Amino acid sequence: MTSIGERIKKARLKIGLSQMELAEAANVSQPTVANWENDSHTPRQAALEKLAQILDSETSWLKVGDAVLEHHTHSIDEYLARPVHHVPIFAWPSPNTARTQLVDGKARDYVAISIEASKPFALIANDPAMAAHFPIGSAIIFDAGAIDLQDGSCYLFDLGERIVLRRWQSAPGRLEALPNQSAVDPEFVSERPLPLARALMSIRRH
């Protein structure tokens, strides 16, 4: 799961442009490009379309990533072969919740979803620092079986006194909020942490 900013940066580097060169081509300032790439600001639709032309990319890919490509490339048979999980939805864990009690208790609801996950569960989002990507009140689908850390992906981390959802980035190792804002500082770690689960997607609840 990558952000718009990460996809813009990836596409820019792929064709060998600097931030300044992309800024000149898009008729914006270099700080604007930097803000896009670190997710401080999201380009408007017109800007995304122009960026797609400059970066030789699809607007839909810049906007939502590989999910669109998967939708078009997977055959019906492949889609139907995916397992349907009835994923339990739990409230967000309270402070000092032990990692072994993360999904203890009765589920508030269930959602049926076709997804590749070995240990899926869902939590109700409630973190303003992550609300741009995981709106408050939505159900965030996690996979407790996917705990291999990958740059740009979001995970549940046990920080001792609380359990948080953050994006992992290495070099240096840090847990970041989304989008990156000066008011929400990254948490730097000296050792590579072991996450509780990877966030796969969020679903609006009615």
Image: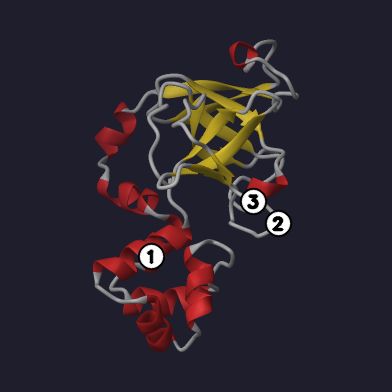
Disc 1 from disc 3: Cα separation: 21 Å
Left or right: residue 170 compared with residue 201:
left
- Residue 194 versus residue 65: which sits nearer the camera? 194
Q: Residue at x 45, y 42 (%)?
A: 153
Q: Is residue 46 something one can see in this rendering?
A: no
Disc 3 from disc 2: Cα separation: 6 Å
Name the secondary structure under disc 1.
helix
- Residue 103 versus residue 96: which sits nearer the camera? 96
Q: Which mark is residue 9?
A: 1
Name the secondary structure under disc 3.
loop
Measured from the top left, where is residue 121 in percent x and y? 54, 23
Q: Amino acid at mark 3?
A: Asp
Contact between labelled residues 2 and 3, with CB atoms less than 8 Å apart:
no
Name the secondary structure under disc 2.
loop
Residue to which mark 3 is pinned: 185
Residue to which mark 2 is pinned: 183
Measured from the top left, where is residue 66 in percent x and y? 35, 51
Quadrant (top left/top right/bottom left/bottom right) for the N terminus: top left
Q: Amino acid at mark 2?
A: Ala
Q: Residue at x 75, y 24 (%)?
A: 95
On the image, which quarter does residue 90 sit in? top right
